[in-house]
Image (spheres, rainbow, N blue to C red):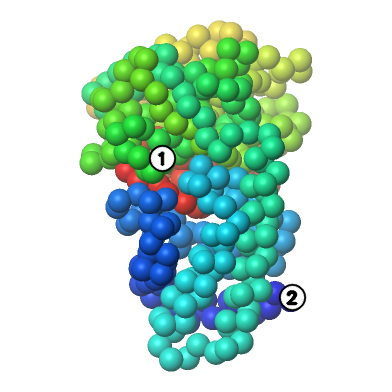
Amino acid sequence: MAIDTALIRRSWSLVEPRSGKVAADFYALLFSRYPQVRGMFPAAMDLQRDRLLHALTRVVLSLGEIEGLTTYLGQLGRDHRKYGVVPEHYPLLGACLITAMRVNAQGVWLPAYDQAWAAAYDLIARVMSEAAERDSHASPPYWTATVVGHELRSHDLAVIVLRPSHPYLFQAGQYTTVQTRQWPRVWRPYSIANPPREDNLISLHVRVVPGGWVSTALAHRTAVGDTVFLGAPRGSMVLSRSTASHLVFIAGGTGLAPLKAIIEETAWMHERPSVDLFHGVRLRSQAYDLPDLLRLREQHGRMRFVLAVSDDPAHPPRESVADTVARHRLPADSEVFICGSPGMVQACTARLLRMGVSGHNVHMEAVDEGGLALPWAAPSVGR
């Protein structure tokens, strides 16, 4: 059955103002009808509902772009393996989702909407389950990793080094998801701060979020010798397709992690591009990785590093990282990678466009205050 994109979008517009209720009703229906699946989800469901809404919105807006949607759904399907999702679960989820939308449409839901969503959900389920099946032949659903390094660089920031139990294949700039023993079924995505290494080690920059379950556990309740669990690598902010001779990296806080990984990767390229790295922090003391960055600059040989401090009177000029970038001359054909808070990413992107940098050359990823990558959807993300 062909997917009627117009009907999908029209029906979604009916329930989008009540999307939070749709998500709550979906999980209530799912757990009441199929209590056996409750154990796949974390105890607290608030962030889980947010992830569902992000995923639904992404799917609705992307139905006309099948190639991009297929890539996105394939990644979701592979990622769902770590939760124990199998093909038999997809029809249960689809039926509950359509029912939740129907009961929240305030009496104006049409039978044609049921049919349109059933066709769309069949596509979603098929792409996700096929991707999961292919992935099952190449990698485990998750990795066990041993903590081999743990450095608390401030009261609220730790650099943690992990050794996965099996080869962990990723690209510089990607992120992983982490589950600790303290919080079963709660996964948090963190950017990997190094490129692939022969010793199979990965480094994470973890800032403690007030009340954050996983960030607190990683920073303050985890030690060398402990084990954590890793999901498959995710993310598309990678260098593999770049041919630019000049690269610009703009980081806010722990958004530094994936950009540092990409820069380190460029240091070993045969035709090494020139690199500018701008790192924005509020206080000079928050430049937590400064010694490593200075060593990387020396190793690279074609890297300029600029620290932007916005709120520290002892470190003039006080300015945002976007203002700092604007003060420095950048080639118009630069390829730019930005990672930081959503507001920082938006401000820097707008400034770059005014400076004449093409929007096609700007790659971005948002992180929250904990250094946590913000994907569109991660099925079971807690705090």
Looking at the image, residue 1 sits to the left or right of residue 155; the answer is right
Report which residue position mark 2 lands on.
2
Report which residue position mark 1 lands on.
188
What percent of the width, then of the height, locates residue 117? Answer: 60, 75
Query: Would you place residue 96 above or below residue 303 in this image?
Result: below
Residue plotted at (58% across, 59% down): 88
Residue plotted at (57% across, 89% down): 111
Q: Residues within 10 Å of mark 2 (few under 14, many from 20)?
A: few
Query: Would you place residue 139 above or below residue 103 in this image?
Result: above
Depth check, front residue: 216 or 95: 95
What percent of the width, then of the height, locates residue 195? Answer: 59, 22
Extreme residue in the front direction: 36
- SS class of the residue under badge 2? loop
Identify residue type, mark 1: Arg
Residue plotted at (52% across, 35% down): 142
Can the viewer see residue 328?
no
